[in-house]
Image (tube, rainbow, N blue to C red):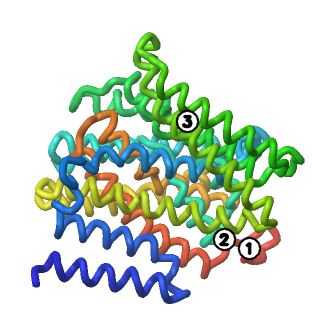
């Protein structure tokens, strides 16, 4: 048995144990991602093409579905909260878009990585915060509302910040189209998230209309019809803007699906919160699993050559993000709980977004290697840090420990 085959066996064993044992479930997602990575390294042909079908075409739609799932966890209140208490949000987002891209550029330059791999490191540092940070903040007993708000706001401004940072830091290495990357983010990230916000209102809104069968049927019919119209309409006259069409179609179809599910749930008097809480995280996990296997399989040879260096870069980059994120909060005299929350938001990037941009906007599987490596490590390190902080609760203003 080859070392890679042994790693596949051990990773699936570890993933199974983490899923089965309650005390280890916080590491289950990370363990399954490691298994995906090991499987793609051992059996790359299984994740390349199936007959004449290239599995790479699944990456963008899967990321759109993942981002839709993220959108269903957000509300307008999450954005409004930033206006009521902007200081920690501005500090966190500012640190994220300042620290992580520059540290990525410095590390990639110091390690003398191949140009496209270097661009991938800069890219993972230039994207918005990842939704996994919200889970880690929850596990650590941090400020979950602030974490969600920061993730939402950093994602919302990513169509401007990510292309700008990439143009400044990576433009001399590979050609970067600011408009092209911005539209790619709108298509892949923003359109599905906005659709998810609408779906959240359908699922959880306290208004009477979202429980009326005729209203839900009308929503499903209208969004389905719009998706067909957009799919069949010639949008070439819109120029580059037409690139966001897939995101609109996916979002509309998913809204229609959610409306139909809500109709069934309402008619049967089921708990729709339980349904969405169980299904969407699972769908997101499977989507990320597939994306990582496809990217890893496509760049296996390059990964063998630079994988060890990339792991070192991921560990350092992530650790600096946690440390400087935390101390940026301390420098601003924020409370301990908020500082810990900012640490997670700065240290944990949206790996799915970076991987999708690498494949969609940069057309480079080599650039997608960094997100494929950084993503699993961020979840592992985040789980460890969350466990540590959970055991050492932050003190409140009166000197007592906050265990909530």
How far across and down, in percent of the image, does residue 275 sit? 67, 66
| SS for callout 3 | helix
Residue labelled with disc 3: 191
Q: CA distance from mark 3 to mark 2?
A: 31 Å
Residue drawn 46% across and 63% down? 285
How far across and down, in percent of the image, does residue 45 sit? 16, 60
CB within 8 Å, label 1 to label 2: yes
- Judge whether 285 appears above or below 298 on screen: below
Determine the residue located farthest toward the top in the rendered image. 237
* Figure quadrant of the C terminus: bottom right
Report whether 403 appears left or right of 111.
Answer: right
Residue drawn 44% across and 45% down? 99
Say whether disc 3 or disc 1 marks the residue closer to the N-terminus: 3
CB within 8 Å, label 3 to label 1: no
Residue drawn 22% across and 55% down? 50
Q: Is residue 151 visible?
A: yes
| SS for callout 1 | loop
| SS for callout 2 | loop
């Amino acid at each position: 048995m080859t070392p890679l085959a042994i790693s596949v066996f051990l990773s699936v064993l570890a993933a199974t144990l983490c899923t089965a044992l309650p005390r280890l479930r916080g590491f289950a997602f990370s363990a399954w991602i490691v298994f995906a990575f090991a499987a793609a390294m051992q059996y790359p042909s299984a994740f390349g093409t199936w007959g004449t079908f290239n599995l790479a075409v699944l990456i963008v739609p899967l990321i759109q579905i993942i981002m839709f799932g993220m959108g269903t966890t957000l509300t307008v209140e999450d954005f409004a909260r930033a206006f009521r208490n902007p200081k920690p949000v501005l500090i966190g987002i500012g640190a994220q878009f300042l620290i992580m891209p520059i540290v990525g550029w410095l590390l990639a330059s110091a390690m003398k990585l191949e140009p496209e791999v270097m661009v991938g490191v800069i890219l993972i540092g230039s994207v918005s915060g990842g939704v996994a940070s919200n889970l880690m903040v929850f596990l650590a007993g941090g400020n979950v509302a602030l974490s969600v708000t920061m993730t939402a706001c950093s994602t919302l401004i990513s169509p401007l910040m990510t292309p700008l940072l990439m143009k400044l830091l990576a433009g001399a290495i590979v050609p970067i189209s600011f408009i092209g990357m911005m539209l790619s983010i709108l298509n892949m990230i923003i359109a599905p998230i906005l659709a998810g916000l609408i779906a959240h209102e359908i699922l959880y809104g306290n208004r009477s209309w979202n429980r009326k069968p005729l209203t839900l049927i009308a929503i499903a019919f209208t969004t389905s019809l719009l998706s067909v119209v957009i799919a069949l309409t010639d949008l070439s006259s819109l120029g580059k803007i037409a690139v966001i069409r897939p995101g609109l179609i996916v979002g509309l179809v998913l809204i229609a699906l959610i409306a139909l599910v809500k109709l069934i749930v309402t008619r049967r008097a089921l708990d729709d919160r339980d349904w969405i809480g169980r299904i969407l995280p699972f769908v997101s996990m499977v989507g990320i699993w597939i994306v990582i296997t496809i990217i890893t399989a496509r760049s296996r040879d390059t990964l063998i050559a630079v994988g060890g260096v990339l792991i070192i870069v991921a560990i350092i980059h992530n650790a600096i993000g946690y440390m400087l994120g935390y101390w940026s909060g301390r420098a601003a005299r924020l409370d301990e709980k908020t500082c810990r929350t900012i640490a997670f938001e700065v240290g944990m990037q949206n790996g799915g977004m970076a991987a999708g941009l690498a494949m969609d906007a940069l057309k480079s599987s080599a650039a997608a290697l960094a997100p494929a490596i950084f993503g699993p490590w961020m979840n592992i390190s985040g789980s460890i840090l969350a466990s540590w902080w959970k055991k050492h609760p932050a003190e409140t203003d009166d000197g007592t420990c906050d265990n909530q």
